[in-house]
Image (tube, grey):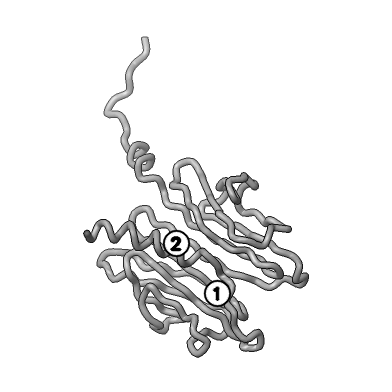
Amino acid sequence: MKRLLFYIIPFLGVLIIFAGVVLFLNQNSGKGALQVTSVPQSQVYLNGQLIGETPLCKCDPKDVIPIGNYRIRLIPKEENTKPYDEQITINKSTLTVIDRTFGESASGSIITLTPLSNKKDTELMVISFPDKTNVFLDNNQKGVAPILLKDVIESDHELKLTKEGYLDKTLRIRTTSGFRLKSVVFLSVNPGIASSSSQTPLSTPQVS
């Protein structure tokens, strides 16, 4: 049962997190929201201050965060698991979404929205680690990361990243007019390829 939940919980999290990232706040609030999920469950620190445990959503109007740059740190509740540190930005009246899976093949993503000067424009920026991953939007290959896609249709989309030697990463996102959606995606190493490449032959056949 525990093993089953390990696979189900991340899947549900992806559906909830990436269905949309626009937060309907008071446009003059000067604050934004933060949502964090992780596997396993982790403590969440913002600029060194504990703000809760995953799954966490600072989404209530009385609980949102002042705009600005922050250092986020996730400390897994499982022992012998290395913490995760990253610089994030909280933008006005939008939701910043962070998802992290720990382990030998760690993966994750950070999604933020940034207002554009032209409210009719809709943009999508994709940054990946490692870089030069293949970027697909709604099953159409758009190029390699890092990449900036302009004039994207305001709608729900499926964003997929692939690279040889790494597991594919698929996210559900929603682009919004007047905003640039920035997706920073961390791909996990394919454990099958990694284990096979680490095996070296005991001897090299001689060709006569």
**Disc 2 on helix, strand or loop?**
helix
Please report the residue visible at 70 percent of the width from the left and 63 percent of the height from the top. Answer: 122
| Residue 67 at x, y percent in the picture | 59, 82
> On the rendered structure, is 177 left or right of 6?
right
Q: Which mark is residue 204?
A: none
Residue 66 vs 169, above or below: the answer is below
**Image quarter for residue 157?**
bottom right
Amino acid, disc 2: Val
Quarter of the rendering occupied by the N terminus: bottom left
Q: What residue does disc 2 label?
A: 14
Q: What residue does disc 1 label?
A: 95
Residue 54 vs 184, above or below: the answer is below
Please report the residue visible at 64 percent of the width from the left and 47 percent of the height from the top. Answer: 142
Please report the residue visible at 72 percent of the width from the left and 58 percent of the height from the top. Answer: 150
Give the residue furthest to the left: 1
Q: Distance between the residues labelled 2 and 1?
A: 15 Å
Comes first in the chain, label 2 or label 1: 2
**Disc 1 on helix, strand or loop?**
strand
| Residue 28 at x, y percent in the picture | 66, 88
**Residue toward you, 148 or 7:** 7
> On the rendered structure, is 121 left or right of 156?
right
| Residue 19 at x, y percent in the picture | 52, 64
Q: How crowded is the residue under tag 1: few (<14 C-alpha within 10 Å), some, or many (20+)? A: many
Give the residue furthest to the front: 155
Amino acid, disc 1: Leu
Query: CB atoms at circles 2 and 1 under 8 Å apart?
Result: no
